[in-house]
Amino acid sequence: MRPVVQNDKIRSQLARRVALPGRLRRPGRARLAKAALRCGAAALAATAVLSACSAPGTGAGAGGSGPGRESGQGGPARNQDPAARLAAEHARLAAAAQHWNLDQVPLTPPAPPVHKPKITARAGFEVDGQEEEHLPPVFTTVPTDKKIVFLTIDDGAEKDPAFLRMMSDLKIPYSAFLSNYLVENDYGYFRKMQAEGHTLNNHTLTHPYLPGLEYEEQRAEICGMQDTMKKEFGKAPTVFRPPYGNYNGDTLRAAKSCGIKYAPIWDEEVYVDHWEYREDDEQLHPGDIVLTHFRGRDDWDGTMVDDMRRFLNKVTREGYAVARLEDYL
């Protein structure tokens, strides 16, 4: 497999065994309301509460007649008490965090901003004609004073179903940047994440070193992936990440001609066994974009679940929530 980032180092460590989620027992309808009220105390006692505390019809192992509906022969649905609903969801997340062996429950991000921040090219990352030609800005951090970070995942080589379950259980948003040569054997995997609200973005057809190509070659890579994504996922994205984080003026001009508005790269990168930083302080900052990859044991001494556990434990421990990048663009 070709390297995906320039500083990608495979470091050995003992592989950790990942607890895959088992089948959760579905509770009877008559017990759902009582189970929800017990959630705060019982969620950490048994994984079964994860199912009992989920709103019926949502979450792992959920079933039933829909949110707020009580058992009985017909009759109107009743709205669950907001406090009970909040307690049930907190308990469900607590049980999910325990199930996936996290140190803490991930923090909930604030609501998306009413007025989105102005995104400009990071200083030193501009190209000639950046402002005059209104070229897509290359940036590593979104302007915000909120303690949030953005998770982005590149390429698409590894298609781990446990990763999809984990992120769904924990309600962690992320943005995928896809290269067609790695995803074309299973578009369905990425349609599943799209159906859960995660955005699929452009990472070229074949993941080349773009500055080494002529303008028309770069345009074919970017516009070709736009066409593929519209065909396979129903929408051509407006967000593009150049492979390896490398680009030149032709890259951004080609991207603009293909309908791209933003070209985020990253400030930190997380691996299954370590973090790497762009800044000398080696710290997270509000609005930072974090990179990782769709990879597994073929490339790492661990799985994507291990990788996400490392990511979530650190950001939560440092008081950060994970927000959806596209909500700020």
Image: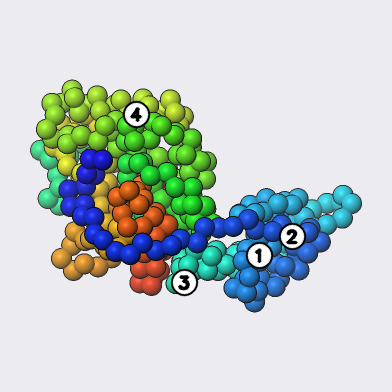
List the residue tagged with mark 2.
27
Residue picked out by circle 3: 104
Whether the residues at callouts 1 and 2 have beta carbons within 8 Å, the answer is: yes
Residue in front for this viewpoint, 83 or 204: 204
For disc 4, the marked residue is 226
Q: Amino acid at mark 3?
A: Gln
Residue 267 position, x and y percent, is 24, 56
Residues at marks 4 and 3 touching, judged by CB atoms closer than 8 Å:
no
Extreme residue toward the right, this view: 73
User: Residue 46, percent across and down?
Assistant: 63, 70
User: Mark 3 or mark 2: which comes first in sequence?
Assistant: 2
Q: CA distance from mark 4 to mark 3?
A: 39 Å
Separation (CA) of disc 3 from disc 2: 26 Å
Looking at the picture, which amino acid does disc 1 mark? Answer: Ala
Residue at 21% in and 47% down:
5
Question: Mark 1 vs mark 3: which is more N-terminal?
Answer: 1
Depth-wise, is mark 4 or mark 1 nearer the camera?
Answer: 1
Q: Which mark is residue 48?
A: 1
Q: Amino acid at mark 4?
A: Gln
Q: Nearer the viewer, mark 3 or mark 2?
A: 2
Q: Sort mark 2 into few (<14), some (14-19) or many (20+) by Cα contacts within 10 Å.
A: some
Residue 137 position (above or below residue 180): below
Q: Of label 4 and label 2, which has the lower sequence position?
A: 2
> Which quadrant is home to the N terminus?
top left
Mark 4–mark 2 distance (CA, rounded to whole Å)? 45 Å
Question: In this figure, what is the number of numbered marks?
Answer: 4
